[in-house]
Amino acid sequence: MDSREEMAPAVRSILDAARERSGGASRVTVDDARSLPAAVGAAEADGRTPVVAEVKPTSPTTAGETERDPVELAEEMVAGGAAALSVLTEPEHFGGSIENYRRVREAVDVPVLRKDFLLEEAQLDAVAADVVLLIARFLGDDLAAMLEAARDRGMQVLVEVHSADELERAVDAGAEIIGVNNRDLTELEVDLDTFEAVAPAVPDSATLLAESGISTTADARRMREAGADGLLIGTAIMDGDPRENTTQFVNA
Ligand SMILES: O=C(O)c1ccccc1NCC(=O)[C@H](O)[C@H](O)COP(=O)(O)O
């Protein structure tokens, strides 16, 4: 893991809060996880760009916080053609909650990613999730153990990387769903070149998502041309009409 000094202050604060968050009261087992790779494949077969639309009430790089109901937003995204959803459960910096995750998963029938900054095995037990995000940069040497702990519970894992080195660690740890984040967590700057640089080394067998900074349909096409099986899009879908925005990306 990077030293604290190398991280943006907002990211230091996110990690400090994550270290304080408790896990679930008891171990969770998921026996009905909805498959993210299958949903991505089905959208592709259907002629839709596979979009993982994110319910993201706010973030360190977003002005203000939406007051819209997460379930209403999620239903609009699915109606717009999203193959899957991502729901923030981080409360302090993203306005998310475990309750939002539970309510959204109950309301839709697509796979739902739990988007959080998980550092400890017990934090996996906060809610039964189809897919959890594990960030290679933050987990360092604990990545393989966390991945196994999530799979033991029946959850799929999206391993997020930002560099060739992190990708190598993700592959060594056994990642099968990989997200290349275009947002640099040191400066919080977004650069779509990141995906183009890292994607060629991702094994063909992995389901590969491009994450962050996809603002236009031209960006979406660019990420697809660079090898993305699916696109994880938050801000550009949340900003305005989520159904229309999702449809635009689905038809990109
Ligand atoms: O989105 C942020 O401001 C942010 C800041 C610090 C750490 C992580 C952050 N985002 C997490 C995400 O993974 C994004 O929400 C996701 O990739 C969607 O990105 P975007 O489409 O650019 O909203």
Image: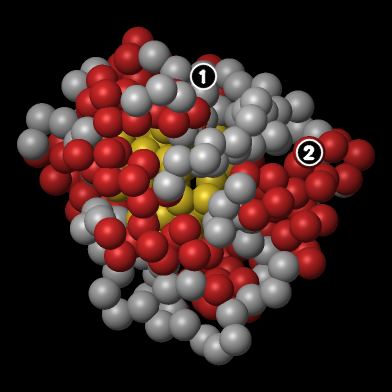
Q: Secondary structure at mark 1?
A: loop
**6 left or right, relative to 145:** right
Residue identified by numbered label 2: 10
Residue closest to the far right: 5
Q: Is mark 2 within 8 Å of ligand 1?
A: yes
Residue closest to the far left: 46
Q: Is residue 214 above or below residue 141?
A: above
Q: Residue 248: percent from the left, percent from the top?
A: 26, 20
**77 left or right, relative to 239:** left
Residue identified by numbered label 1: 192
**170 left or right, relative to 221:** right
How busy is the neighbourhood of tag 2: few (under 14 within 10 Å), some, or many (20 plus)?
Answer: some
Q: Secondary structure at mark 2?
A: helix
Q: Residue 176: percent from the left, percent from the top?
A: 39, 55
Q: Residue 185: percent from the left, percent from the top?
A: 70, 35
The tag earlier along the polypeptide, 1 or 2, is 2
Looking at the rendered structure, the kind of residue marked 1 is Leu
Q: How many marks?
A: 2
Residue drawn at x 59%, y 80% is: 24
Q: Quadrant of ligand 1?
A: top right
Q: Is residue 198 visible?
A: no
Residue closest to the far top: 218
Give the foreground label among 1 and 2: 2
Q: CA distance from mark 1 to mark 2?
A: 21 Å
Residue drawn at x 62%, y 45% is: 94
